[in-house]
Each structure stands twice: as C-alpha cells, then as structure tokens.
C-alpha cells in the first residue's frame, strides 16, 4: 500500500505557506516529514496535521497550544485529544468574544469621532 507523499515544494503550494514557515513548523515539531537524503516528503498524516495547524491559527491558537494538542493524540489518543480540544475552544471563545466586544466599542468610538469631525467641516 503506497501513500501519496508530497514534496516540500508541493506542501508549500498546497497550503500557500512559505518554505520558512514549513521549516519552522518542522523545527518546533509540529510536523515530522519523512526524510530521504536532503529531500522531505509529507504523508497524509502530515497533510492532516498541517490542515489542523492552519485552522487552529485562524482561530487564534498559539503554535505551542497546537503543538501540545497534537502531542495529546500521539500520547493519549483521540478521546483525550478531543476533550482537550473542547477545553481549548472554550477558552478561545471567551477570548474572541472579549475581542469582539472591544472591537465593537472601538468602531463605535471611531465612527462618532469621524462624524463629529465631518460635521465640523461643514
């Protein structure tokens, strides 16, 4: 059974990331490609991990939080990882809602200031 493997260049293209980003994710042990000489190959497992990493970044999770979360799967399995996910998501939802409130307040303040200045202009 042969799994499709992506080269370093294909992985960068698939996920629209720079080579520097991909190397960094390897350096901090988020990804662990197979190595043959100087070449790196990414298995479906690594592709799935990259998908999770980028989704997690979009939700505002730190790389360290994501690394720890992925490590739970390796050490404790799916159930433990999903429980940790719920806890991480709950924490992040609180933080995002706070940011949302602050953003709404900033927009309101800026709109008022803009309107006041525009009114003074005539």
Image: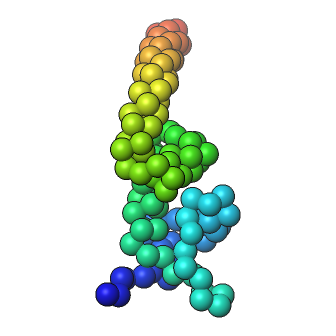
Residue 67: percent from the left, percent from the top? 56, 50
Residue 28 quadrant: bottom right
Asked if residue 2 can be seen in this view, the reply is yes
Asked if residue 9 can be seen in this view, the reply is no
Residue 119: percent from the left, percent from the top? 46, 10
The residue shown at (56%, 42%) is: 65
Residue 30 quadrant: bottom right
Q: Residue furthest bottom?
A: 37
Towards the viewer: 122 or 88? 88
Q: Residue furthest left?
A: 1
The residue shown at (41%, 59%) is: 51
The residue shown at (56%, 46%) is: 68
Q: Is residue 17 above or below residue 101?
A: below
Q: Which residue lies furthest to the front in this view?
A: 76
Q: How many numbered circles are shown?
A: 0
| Quarter of the image where the N terminus is located | bottom left
Residue 94 quadrant: top left
Q: In this view, does 76 lie to the left or right of 37?
A: left
Residue 95: percent from the left, percent from the top? 49, 24
Residue 35: percent from the left, percent from the top? 59, 83
Q: In this view, does 107 lie to the left or right of 27?
A: left
């Amino acid at each position: 059974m042969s799994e499709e493997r992506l080269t370093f260049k294909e992985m960068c293209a698939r996920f629209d990331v720079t080579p520097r980003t991909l190397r960094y994710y390897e350096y901090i042990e988020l990804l662990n490609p197979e190595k043959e000489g100087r070449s790196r190959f990414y298995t479906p497992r690594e592709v799935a991990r990259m998908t999770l990493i980028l989704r997690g970044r979009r939700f505002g999770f730190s790389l360290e939080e994501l690394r720890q979360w992925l490590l739970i799967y390796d050490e404790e399995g799916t159930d433990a990882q999903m429980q940790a996910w719920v806890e991480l998501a709950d924490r992040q939802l609180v933080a995002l809602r706070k940011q949302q409130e602050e953003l709404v307040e900033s927009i309101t303040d800026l709109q008022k200031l803009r309107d006041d200045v525009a009114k003074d202009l005539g």
